Amino acid sequence: MLNPKIEAEIVKNKVCINLTRCPVCDSFSTYAHYMKDAKTKLESLWHQCHCGTIWQKDKAKNKYGQEYFNNNNDSHIKVTDCLNYCAKLYLPIIEEMMYGRKVLHVGYMNDCQKNLFVDMGWVFKSLDLENKKADIVDNIETYKCDTKYNLIWMPMILECLEKPKETLLRIKDMLAEDGIIFIETPDTNFLSIRSPSGFVHWKKEHNNLMWRKEKLVEYLEQIGFKVSMARNNYEHRFMFVDTVHIIAQKKFF
Amino acid sequence: MKKVLVCRWGAFGDCIITTPVIRKLKQDGWEIYYATNERGGQILKLNPHITKFFETKTDSIKDMDKYLGDIKKEYKIDEVVNLSESIEVDLSLHPRSPRYMYSKQERFEMCNINFYEHTFTKFPFLDMSMITDESMIPDLMRPELFFSEEELKEAQSYMKPDKFNIMIGMAGSGNNKAWPWTELLCGSILNEMKEHVHIITVGDVKCKLIEPVEPKYITNLADKTSMRVSCAMTKFADLLISPDTGLLHASGCYDTPKIGMIGHNTIENITKYFSNDYSLQSDPELATCAPCFRMIYDMPLQCPQCDETGAAWCMQYGIKPELVFEQVKKVYVKSQNRS
């Protein structure tokens, strides 16, 4: 059981909570979460804005390299099923929404996911699988897009980006006129449903900024998307829980 | 001699399913160590093939890898095969599994596999070169149980030698396995063959509430006998009627005629290799959800239920009492012809 007094004392001695500006809505914020990972013992400081956005004081490294891919290319049937479930569930809905079949996969994946897209008739390109490094910021922000994609699939990647607002704008340009973006990302609404320590996405080394579902939907609508689905997920059938699944299509008429 | 550690935490039936593979391991010259829970311990007690048991009081272990690793190290085990959740995950789908949500057709294609056969696939190091003919498979897959003289004597004492002894299992580990027509079935049996039959009902303490009472013709044994004795009784009964429970698997050890009433699974899953099998599976025309191949933990949430009886749709409507009664008559007539 935590003792708030002792915890507060530790925080007081270790960190200084400064007035900061929210990277999403630009409001001032002094509210912070000081977290310590029970497994890795890594300590991290996260700011929270009243709009629900949570961002890390330090920038996440997000450098994984070949070793990460080798370790995570798990083909166990349970992992494969969970990784593929999102695509298996949502691709038929997306296919109904437009005709094109060119997909760009951004973020960690393994071969089984690629096979699922290919089996369903998609022309598949993956940033990270081809580069063999999950250096997302480099990949997506320096990616020279020579074609327009019909679908950009972003599972658990938005929260890793340093400048998600800018990246989303860039992704919009990479989409065809009726293109769709699928986003799976942590939803900070779950903080109040569980408790800060019960929220599973305090990943110092991976995550930079986490959105509240409503704010992300608002931003996507603002930059020219029509959000067809924004669904909270707490089911373990998916690889990640306490997330939001979003299907947003460019407004084309 | 090579050593293998087999682990299975589960219900009675789950442990019975592992018995054919244990026998085969022994035949292949393995020394067998077995880690299980209390129920598994009951089922496998007196099994001569097992060198040593590791029995836990709880149904799960917090740090399973460490627990098994320690045993492996201490006893210098060569192979460890953890069968816990082997069927629950692969063939009976957990609500947390994506496959739980797949279409009925997809689930059927993935899960309509015999549990006994599936267990063998977890032991790739078994020598199967001797199995040259398909006709050898039923013998290979036949489960086995071992009882003491006292247990067998007690089990036999509940039978009436001059009568056709029908043993009825009232319920299984899940509420979804309860068949609500038992009383009606007993009524039909007694109406037609009162003078020739003796019915024995078995089950846990809750089953006492639903046991049909007719002292002259029905012996009510729910909560009165141990699970081991109930299993031993399947050897001496002339017919066993039971939903998909440990009792049905126990009857698979013997040639006793059996009518399994299978709702959320299929005959292929359970009784395919049993001898004298008259099992019925839920009719998908009458209960369109069946077979679902799903693990049911919360019946009101997961199952369509009958408003009146609260039984799962597949058991209430999918297995008609008339059909079960027809099977009973078939077995009875056959036994009379034989005698």
Image (cartoon, rainbow, N blue to C red):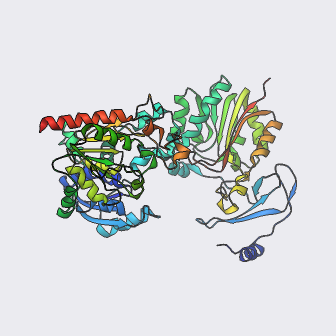
Visible residue check, residue B4? no
Q: Quadrant of residue A220?
A: top right
Please tell me how many numbered marks the rendered image carries.
0
Visible residue check, residue B20? yes
Q: Quadrant of residue B6?
A: bottom left
Considering only vertical position in the picture, is B158 above or below B271? Answer: below
Considering only vertical position in the picture, is A213 above or below A225? Answer: below
> Relative to A64, is B2 on the left or the right?
left
Q: Quadrant of residue A155?
A: top right
Can you give x and y, in whole percent of width and height, for residue A62 in the image?
A: 65, 52
Residue at 36 percent across and 49 percent down: it is: B212
Residue at 44 percent across and 35 percent down: it is: B317
Can you give x and y, in whole percent of width and height, for residue B225 in the image?
A: 30, 60
Q: In the image shown, does B311 or A54 lie closer to the viewer?
A: B311
Can you give x and y, in whole percent of width and height, for residue B5 in the image?
A: 31, 60
Q: In the image shown, does B66 or B52 lie closer to the viewer?
A: B52
Quadrant containing the N terminus of chain B in the rendered view: bottom left
Can you give x and y, in whole percent of width and height, for residue B36 in the image?
A: 35, 61
Quadrant containing the C terminus of chain B in the rendered view: top left
> Relative to B113, is B51 on the left or the right?
left
Considering only vertical position in the picture, is A59 above or below B89? Answer: below
Residue at 19 percent across and 34 percent down: it is: B333
Which residue sits furthest left? Answer: B339
> Relative to B61, is B193 on the left or the right?
left
Q: In the image shown, does B4 or B142 lie closer to the viewer?
A: B142
